Image (cartoon, rainbow, N blue to C red):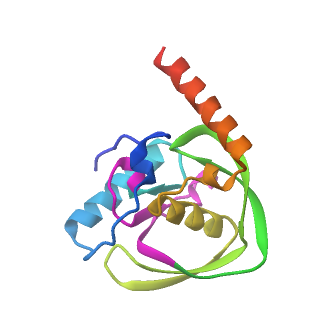
Amino acid sequence: MTIRPILIAPDPKLKAVAAEVDKVDGSIRRLIDDMLETMYKADGVGLAAVQIGVAKRVVVMDVDQKDGNRYPRAFVNPTLTWASEETVVHEEGCLSVPDIWEEVKRPARIICDYLDRDGNAQTQEADGMLAVCLQHEIDHLNGKLFIDHLSRLKRSMSLKKLAKAQKLKEG
């Protein structure tokens, strides 16, 4: 497994719409393993392939890892097939938008169809953190960041804060 560099906004590759995966094979499973290793190293709960510069519809997540447990999951070609009218507001962050946390409103419950790491068709009903994380990561596959859900003013402020932090980090 290889830890891959995570792209940071406003990298234009983060705006790419990811391509469908034709077949879940050894190269996709290696990508999944690298993504999980990268996500855990960065202390994240989810990662989309576009965040490491691979424009494929692959997402990994582990919403339990913050509790000290590990339940890694892979979603290949995830598609939301249903979303509730009921919404929730949840504070979100992103490995590609480090140190920025903002409240985002999303559907409270969803149904997602996807292929697992063995290429088997699956359906996931989700609410809570899993629903939020799935929607956040699927947004990445469609070239959208969580800050794109914010008002123009909040998004602008977040990007300025990010740019300032990056300049300080670069020294």
Is residue 67 placed above or below 134 in the rendered structure?
above
**Residue found farthest to the front:** 152
Q: Is residue 74 magenta?
A: yes
x and y percent of residue 104 in the render?
A: 72, 56
Q: Is residue 46 magenta?
A: no
The residue closer to the viewer here, 161 or 58, is 161
x and y percent of residue 43 in the render?
A: 53, 44
Q: Specify start and end residues of the magenta stretch as a single range.
A: 50-79
Quarter-of-image position of residue 65: bottom right
Residue drawn at (21%, 67%) of the image: 26
x and y percent of residue 155 in the render?
A: 66, 43
Residue drawn at (37%, 48%) of the image: 52
Is residue 39 placed above or below 169 in the rendered structure?
below
The residue closer to the viewer here, 22 or 123, is 22
Q: Can I make out residue 62 in this image? A: no
Is residue 50 placed above or below 128 in the rendered structure?
above
Tell me: 34 left or right of 25: right
Residue drawn at (63%, 70%) of the image: 131
x and y percent of residue 137 in the render?
A: 52, 61
Q: Can I make out residue 22 in this image? A: yes
